[in-house]
């Protein structure tokens, strides 16, 4: 894992049309001259309870909007700014870092398409959530999640749709989205670029079987769910379909492609959600990933054999570096990502509906 301040280079891997890229390819984090500390678990008294975005109360939605607005109001070079947070994804996913710390400085780091996918994104959101809470002075602040595995939660949440709210810009709006999809609202969890044009009812059933496919049928053992082994010295896995975990390759990627703008003529690189380097610029990215993170929890809670995290030391000891809510640089390890209890957050579940897809065997 990188010392993110000293080895970062401009990104570009995976961005086909660099010349016309809508977002910056300079994705390195601000360097504040800090030394990297080891992560310590939070000692918060309360557990942050992430809430389903489609049933958020007005108070929850207002707070969340205000927190994102506060992030947008920071200067870009602040490590907590909206742009700095978006660039984290770009740097870790589009060739910003090399494996220099492990002696393979000619190889890029890519945290997608392998078993780094779930833990990296868990840490990314962990800090993002705590930073947002700090910005609005709410120590219990919790992110919403886009609950696309339950019929009522499948449309893109209403709060992301309007461009303005009471005459002011809606901090959750992003102009680089596929307007046709946003208008129709119900996501297609099995979308790879072709619209199905089926009635909503049928789309809902399709989505339920897609969730079943990703969590049960295709995710029956550790590496099928997490993704393949990727260790120091390996080339970054760009499109290695065989090593991508079931959720990452399935519903996760479909939501990215479904939300992202149409390629030509609208955007050169499917900005924002349809490309790694730009995805973090859409606030919807983080609520999508909070549900992806929840899939890890649901998968683990399913009473099926084989649903366990990797135990190899290469996985346990893989690490990343983030700015925390105090602007300190901290190094975090996969091994510390497995317990939500220790990380002091969890997901609000409606007990009747935890697995609405469990009878949706395709
Ligand atoms: Cu890091 Cu959803 O991608």
Image (cartoon, helix red, strand yellow):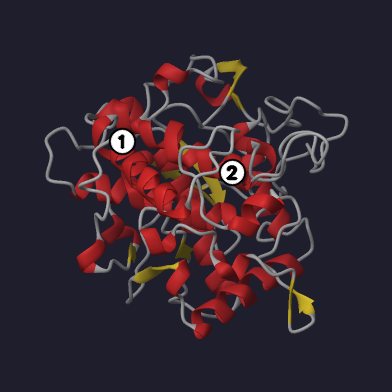
SS at badge 2: helix
SS at badge 1: helix
Residue drawn at (29%, 29%) of the image: 218
Could you tell me if residue 283 is visible in this image? no
Q: Is residue 311 above or below residue 104?
A: below
Q: Which residue matches tag 1?
A: 213
Q: Residues within 10 Å of mark 1 (few under 14, many from 20)?
A: many
Q: Which residue matches tag 2?
A: 258
Say whether residue 295 is left or right of residue 100.
left
Residue 238, given in percent of the width and then of the height, sits at 56, 21
Q: Which mark is residue 101?
A: none
Residue drawn at (56%, 26%) of the image: 109
Residue drawn at (60%, 56%) of the image: 184
Residue 142, given in percent of the width and then of the height, sits at 45, 70
- Count of numbered badges drawn on the protein: 2
207 or 131: nearer the eye?
Answer: 207
Residue 67, given in percent of the width and then of the height, sits at 61, 73
Could you tell me if residue 18 is visible in this image? yes
- For label 1, being within 8 Å of ligand 1 is answered no
The residue furthest right is 19
Q: Which quadrant holds residue 313? A: top left
Residue 58, given in percent of the width and then of the height, sits at 52, 84
174 or 178: nearer the eye?
Answer: 178
Q: Earlier in the sequence, mark 2 or mark 1?
A: 1
Say whether residue 68 is left or right of residue 361.
right
If the image is split into quadrants, where does the C terminus sit?
A: top left
Q: Are marks 2 and 1 in contact (CB under 8 Å)?
A: no
Q: Is residue 296 above or below residue 265?
A: below
Say whether residue 205 is left or right of residue 311.
right
């Amino acid at each position: 894992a990188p010392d993110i301040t000293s080895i970062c280079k401009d990104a570009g891997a995976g961005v086909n049309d660099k010349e016309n890229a809508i977002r910056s390819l300079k994705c390195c984090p601000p360097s504040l001259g800090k030394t990297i500390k080891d992560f310590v678990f939070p000692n918060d008294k309360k557990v942050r309870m992430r809430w389903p975005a489609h049933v958020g109360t007005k108070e929850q939605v207002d707070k969340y909007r205000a927190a994102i607005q506060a992030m947008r109001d920071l200067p870009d070079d602040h490590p907590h700014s909206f742009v700095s947070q978006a660039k984290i994804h770009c740097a870790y996913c589009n060739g910003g870092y090399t494996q220099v710390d492990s002696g393979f400085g000619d190889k890029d780091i890519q945290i997608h398409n392998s078993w780094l996918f779930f833990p990296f994104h868990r840490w990314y959101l962990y800090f993002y959530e705590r930073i947002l809470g700090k910005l609005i002075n709410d120590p219990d602040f919790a992110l919403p999640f886009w609950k696309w595995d339950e019929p009522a939660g499948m449309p893109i949440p209403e709060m992301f749709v309007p461009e303005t709210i009471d005459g002011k810009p809606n901090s959750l709006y992003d102009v680089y989205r596929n307007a046709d999809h946003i208008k129709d609202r119900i996501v297609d969890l099995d979308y790879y670029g072709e619209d199905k044009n089926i009635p909503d009812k049928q789309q809902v059933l399709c989505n339920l079987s897609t969730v079943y496919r990703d969590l049960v049928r295709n995710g029956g053992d550790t590496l099928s769910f997490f993704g393949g082994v990727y260790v120091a010295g390996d080339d970054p896995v760009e499109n290695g379909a065989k090593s991508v975990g079931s959720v990452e390759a399935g519903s996760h990627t479909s939501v990215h492609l479904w939300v992202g703008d149409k390629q030509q003529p609208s955007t050169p690189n499917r900005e924002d959600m349809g490309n790694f380097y730009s995805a973090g610029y859409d606030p919807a990215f983080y609520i999508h990933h909070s549900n992806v993170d929840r899939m890890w929890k649901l998968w683990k809670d399913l009473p099926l054999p084989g649903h366990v995290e990797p135990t190899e030391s290469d996985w346990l000891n893989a690490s990343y570096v983030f700015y925390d809510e105090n602007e300190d640089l901290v190094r975090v390890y996969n091994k510390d990502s497995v317990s939500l209890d220790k990380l002091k957050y969890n997901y609000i579940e409606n007990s009747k509906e935890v697995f609405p897809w469990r009878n949706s065997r395709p």
